[in-house]
Image: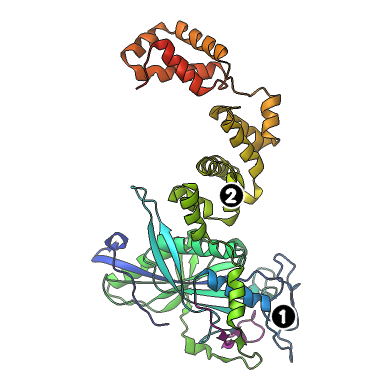
Amino acid sequence: MTLVDVRTPDPKRFIPGATGDWEVIIGMEVHAQVLSNSKLFSGASTEFGKPANANVSLVDAAMPGMLPVINEECVRQAVRTGLGLKAQINKRSIFDRKNYFYPDLPQGYQISQFKDPIVGEGQIVISLGPDRQGQFEDIEIGIERLHLEQDAGKSMHDQHPTMSFVDLNRSGVALMEIVSKPDMRSSDEAKAYMTKLRSIVRYLGTCDGNMDEGSMRADVNVSVRRPGEGFGTRCEIKNVNSIRFIGQAIEYEARRQIGILEDGGSIDQETRLFDPGKGETRSMRSKEDAHDYRYFPDPDLLPLEFDDAFIEAMRADLTELPDDKKARFVAELGLSIYDASVLVSEKAIADYFEAVAEGRDGKIAANWVINDLLGALNKLGKDIEETPVSPAQLGGIIDLIKAETISGKIAKDLFEIVLTEGGDPAEIVETRGMKQVTDTGAIEKAVDEIIAANPDQVEKVKAKPTLAGWFVGQVMKSTGGKANPQAVQALVKAKLGIEDE
């Protein structure tokens, strides 16, 4: 990979040091487990959570004479991901042997790709913001490559006092290694990149993105330099499995390197681990280069080849991706960029919103989904997939407001009932007597009573008409929020002799 600097140094991203400003350079290698029923080169299951060594075939265990056979669905998933990254799809790619020795790698080498990956250069656009002016900054991050490779197993050192055990369930599971260019210049950019990449693969259905299960993890390359100078020596932080930890690891590592350089030292190229408990990185081993792995083409696997028709069939079957969906929400539904960004952050949220907005006002639907539903789910610690309120129920509440069957205040109460108890919103309104009072006579009676009981406030309103809102609030309170707010406001103004401006 040839390092090319595509970013103009931006002072607002500089890190102040004791001897001047510094700039952090970040590149990421993300390992995303391919969503497939079986492994990359065997028919063994990929189901998560099975007992140790339950998902192991003779191929995964590297028994003598066992030959790998490519899983076509894994190839398709890699191509789909490449298309989602707007990347070059290479119609000919080669699998290589990457030689290194660990107890949980039975073959003594990993089948990966080196010089000829399945996917070439692409890009991801990340969005930072909003800033204090409500503006967003879009930044293009280059993708260097995506290649397929098999995962290793897992060594377990806490099962026995004197021995380590090995679980080969993950051995041979298909991974997509997605390598970015060194285009990121802050921890916020790196977190936004990981968030966007996870969103894309989830939309595509090529990886579940569950970082807590290890199905998506990142190796983060960090270096620092004086603004405008060449790239510094990088350190790689291995296997970071949380977006929050990615940010913390970068912040610590950048400061660590700046401290060494300002003290007159030099940075050793090495692999480091991040300790979330201490919030710091620590040395793991010296960093290997490609030649250390002695790559050579795997003699058991022919080159992988397919034609334009195969690629175009994959392209035609792609789902609408987050950026396209966001642009459509803004253009067709009139949503703000912020609201659209929130709604497309997860495919499940976008799908929920579209079901609610179908045939209704998009802005109103967006407000209810973002402020009320997502706010409530956040308090409950639930994801959108676990929502107690269905799109049909939330849509029903919005319909009742539009029909003026209930007021906005009653709608909030109704939402809480549906959230905690369930039920059909229209039936709840009917059986619990929550309908909005639209009888002008009843509303007028309530207005007269409030005015008669508050002569001092009447005098204040005559001096300052804007205080009429106090009467509106009192009438709404006295009617339990059931009075039609527009009718209340009109009657209050009429009774107090306030003319509309």
Residue 114 covered by magenta stretch: no
Give the labeled residue for mark 2. 354
Three-letter amino acid code of the residue under disc 1: Ser
Camera-nearest residue between 203 and 360: 360
Q: Is residue 60 left or right of residue 205?
A: right
Quarter holding the N terminus is bottom left
Whether the residues at callouts 1 and 2 have beta carbons within 8 Å, the answer is no
Determine which quarter of the picture holds residue 72.
Answer: bottom right
Label located before the other in sequence (1 or 2): 1
On the image, the x and y values in percent for residue 76 come to 63, 75
- Residue 74's quadrant in the figure? bottom right
Name the residue: 53% across, 79% down: 89
Report if residue 89 lies within the magenta region: yes
Q: How many angstroms separate mark 1 from mark 2 (CA)?
A: 39 Å
Residue hosting label 1: 42
Observer able to see residue 187:
no
Q: What is the magenta range? A: 88-111
Q: Is residue 35 visible?
A: yes
- Secondary structure under tag 1 reads loop
Task: Identify the main secondary structure in magenta.
Answer: loop
- Callout 2 crowding tier (Cα within 10 Å): few <14, some 14–19, many ≥20: some
Horizontal and vertical percent position of residue 12: 29, 59
Position of residue 421 measured from the top left corner of the image (x, y, whole percent): 69, 35
